[in-house]
Image (cartoon, rainbow, N blue to C red):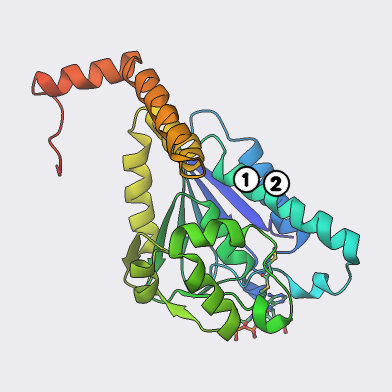
Amino acid sequence: MAALVEIEQDGELLFVKLNRPQKRNAVNDALILALEAVFSDMPDGVKCAVLHSEGDHFSAGLDLSELQERDIIEGLHHSRMWHRVLDKIQFGKVPVVAVLKGACVGGGLEIASACHIRVAEASTFYALPEGQRGIFVGGGASVRLPKLIGMARMADMMFTGRTISAEEGVWMGFSQYVTMAGEGLEKGIELAKRIAQNAPMTNYALMHVLPRIADSSQSEGLLMESLMATIAQSSPEAKQRLTDFLEGRAKKVGQ
Ligand code: 1HE
């Protein structure tokens, strides 16, 4: 049987592919746990991951056929398990670029929102069908999505069941990039290669410190910023990069 999540390392990049196209990459327990295994054990040398999908859809969300079989306490543990796995993506070792297409809904959108950059092909549509299915989000959407699109927009999506197009999604904040059909992976790779060139301390600060600052009070946030800035500036790599710029060896902004 084919793996539900396929991985392939190419130098500094790790490609992680959702591979359940016959079920539109609906996320059953085996698939979410396979993602956990990948992000818990990042191979040496990887500096950025690209999360993409087989078939026409990124993910149809939670596998609803498994939902019917859970009692209340199992449901609670299940939601907490999703939180654990998605935290491993968001707060793992390397930044993750998600390449989206077709359905990016429910739990699929929750997985995408745990990634650091989202590239949406023109076919992408976002929805939170939980509202219509009589349930609530359980994989972290209520925490992560308001940070991307605002609470009012998330509530509207759940109250009304509306779908958001790739074009709307880019100005609303779901994705930072939108591409033509079939060009998402190429764009994702281009971005991942750029990210892999950053100083590891910078990527660490963006993944682990910036979100904590965003969750903090102003005075705590500003202190954390100063501490992070001081640590980053004193790293040998930062010193080298600054010298390279001052001596004309580094790229200018925009190059
Ligand atoms: C599924 C699922 C699924 C497809 N669980 N099996 N998510 C949803 O409510 C979205 C439900 N899915 C859809 O609305 C549609 O499938 C799509 C718009 C994504 C795609 O439509 P289409 O016409 O291309 O495919 P299809 O014919 O609907 O589905 C193909 C197969 O995938 C079919 O199975 P088959 O055995 O009959 O071939 C579908 O049953 C199966 N399939 N989506 C189970 N979601 C951590 S909490 C998160 C809570 C949620 O994510 S709730 C949102 C759930």
Q: Secondary structure at mark 1?
A: helix
Residue 210 at x, y percent in the picture:
44, 39
Query: Which of these two is toward me, 151 or 175?
Result: 151
Along the horizontal axis of the image, is 72 left or right of 194? right
Q: Which type of secondary structure does the marked residue at label 2 adopt?
A: helix
Amino acid tagged 1: Asp
Q: Closer to the camera, 131 or 108? A: 131
Q: Residue at x 8, y 23 (%)?
A: 248
Q: Quadrant of ligand 1?
A: bottom right
- The vertical placement of 79 against 66, above or below, is above
Residue bearing the label numbered 1: 87
Task: Find the residue positioned furthest to the left.
Answer: 248
Q: Position of residue 222 (x, y in %)?
A: 40, 32
Q: Which mark is on residue 84?
A: 2
Res 159 quadrant in image: bottom right
Residue 11 in view in this figure: no
Per the model, the C-alpha gap separating discs 1 and 2 is 5 Å
Q: Position of residue 68 (x, y in %)?
A: 85, 75
Position of the N terminus, as image quadrant, is: bottom right
Residue 206 screen position, x and y as percent: 42, 38
